Image: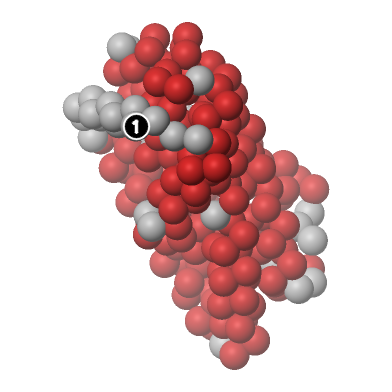
Amino acid sequence: MPELATYLAFVAAVLAMQAVPGPDTLLVVSRGVGQGRTVAIATALGAVGAGVVQLPLLAAGVAALVRSSPLAFEALRYLGAGYLIYLGLRLILRRRRGDAALSPVRATPRSAFLEGMISNLTNPNVLVFMLAFLPQFVDPARGSVAVQLLVLGATQKLCGLVVLAATAFAAGTVGDWIARRPGLILWQERLAGAVMIGLGVRLLAGDARAGRG
């Protein structure tokens, strides 16, 4: 298991990154505004439920990498750190153009759940980000790598559920308000970008292993 300080730092970083509206958030907002909280929450549950498929694949793959080549695992961490810095710079430097609203096709809670899950599973950036982000907080010396990844991944998904569920509840009233204020979204993105860059630089600079808090 990760150290408590490492785990708390991980939670703080995840929450900061979850503040950036992505495809899942836009989908939940569109469902909340167009069809109400029940459908929006079902969509959020579907997006988070994709972790049932993603986390075992990620944990098994990284754990096998550690067993076969600890050096390759360290290389993965450094590549992941570089990828986080790239994502952070892109968030900070890009100009917000305003995302097109998703058309509110009528949906039942069941179909909304499936839509949320499929949307998350078919977005390759989700798994790539998890592969870059989660290993930064794993320490093979503290036990099973697979278990640590499952704990961290489940925490990330639960944090995502909290954020998406809050978005679903607020979508009818706050969603439109936020959508009309691109400057607010821009600063959310810059905050998350700064967090990503900080994590990446911390590892690459060799100040301390990012996985040890």
Instruction: State the residue lying farthest toward the bottom.
Output: 68
Which residue occupies 69% across, 62% down? 150
Which residue occupies 66% across, 43% down? 158
Q: Report whether 172 appears left or right of 156.
A: left
**114 or 148, nearer to the observer:** 114
Task: Name the residue type under label 1.
Answer: Val
Q: Report whether 175 appears left or right of 41.
A: left
Q: Is residue 186 above or below residue 114?
A: above
Quarter of the figure that contains the N terminus: bottom right
Which residue occupies 31% across, 12% down? 180
Residue 212 seen anywhere in this rendered image of the structure: no
Q: Quadrant of residue 99?
A: top left
**57 or 212, nearer to the observer:** 57
Q: Quadrant of residue 129?
A: bottom left
In the structure shown, which secondary structural element does the residue marked by tag 1 occupy? loop
Residue 91 seen anywhere in this rendered image of the structure: yes
Q: Is residue 77 above or below residue 162?
A: below
Which residue occupies 43% across, 27% down? 31
Q: Which residue is mark 1?
A: 105
Residue 112 image point, x, y percent? 48, 39
